[in-house]
Amino acid sequence: MVMERFDLTGKVVVVTGAARGLGKQMTLALAKAGADILVADLLTAQNEQTADEVRALSRRAAAVTVDVRDSHQCDDLIERCLKEFGHIDVMLSNAGIGEGRGLNKPLWEVSDDDWADTIAINLSSAFYCARAASRPMIDQGRGVIINLGSGTALRGAPLIFPYAAAKAAVISLTKSLAMLLARHNIRVNCIIPGEFARRPSESEEEQRFWADRGRFFPAQRVGEPWELGPLAVFLASDASSYMTGQGIPVDGGFLSGGYAPASFAPVVLTR
């Protein structure tokens, strides 16, 4: 009886940022749990490959190339889902960028484009997808929205502060959407990943880098991409039917008991 609650057979899930990394691994976990999936990403070839891997698991899949910064494309994404599958049960907004904009720049060198692009991809896209997906969910009387935050959102992040600000807003957006949509039987929760290696290390140097990062966390390692999959399945399924408005960290103890580099050397005052 308990395990049946995790079964996603017959459910339709839309996943943005599904072409690679954490998004791909969550997509495959959802498919293994029984879901049919519309995979969406700007990376067309890799996105098609993800769809092929979903089909190899004997699940239905469709792939859509989408730029989630454009609200009209997000609207079209949901329309494509309804046309392809007939309904939508789960909207997983995973698409985002981390260190690609404003990395290592001091405050006064972060451009308007750096800021705007980071907010658009990490925050506005979650709003656009939630707005579009909630309409058919309200009509059918049920639904689940899952957003992706970041442990960075809960700490100061001087080297990537636009990203940290956007992800903090995603967590707040999740709570507000949960309150707005609860009366429609739509649950909204947020996964908050800590430090994850997005792919297997391609060199000994890269392997040493991740091993060194991991020593700062109580778990003594960084996360592996597949480790987000079980939580995505839980939140998408009836097993989490009494959960909404929550942000759930998956971080190896990073936030509760870990120590991580603060990106600057401490200043020691002397007399």
Image (spheres, rainbow, N blue to C red):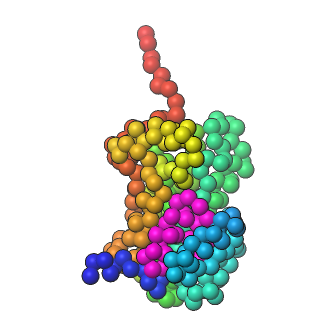
Q: Is residue 28 left or right of residue 72?
A: left
> Farthest residue toward the left?
1
Residue at (63%, 42%) from the top-left corner? 103
Numbered label tally = 0
- Quarter holding residue 192: bottom left
Question: Would residue 214 be counted in the magenta stretch?
Answer: no
Residue at (41%, 45%) from the top-left corner? 221
Question: Would residue 14 be counted in the magenta stretch?
Answer: yes
| Image height of 178 relative to 10, above or below | above
Q: Nearer the viewer, residue 28 or 75?
A: 28
| Image height of 32 relative to 221, above or below | below
Q: Position of residue 28 (x, y in %)?
A: 50, 70
Q: Nearer the viewer, residue 48 or 176?
A: 48
Q: Is residue 214 left or right of residue 64?
A: left
Q: Nearer the viewer, residue 205 or 256?
A: 205
Residue at (48%, 57%) from the top-left corner? 225
Q: Which residues are magenta?
A: 13-40
Q: Position of residue 263 (x, y in %)?
A: 52, 34
> In which quadrant will I find the N terminus?
bottom left
Q: Is residue 267 visible?
A: yes
Q: Nearer the viewer, residue 240 or 54?
A: 54
> In which quadrant will I find the C terminus?
top left
Q: Is residue 156 visible?
A: no
| Image height of 110 relative to 44, above or below | above
Q: Position of residue 207 (x, y in %)?
A: 51, 42
Q: Position of residue 171 (x, y in %)?
A: 47, 59
Residue at (45%, 17%) from the top-left corner? 269
> Farthest residue toward the top?
271
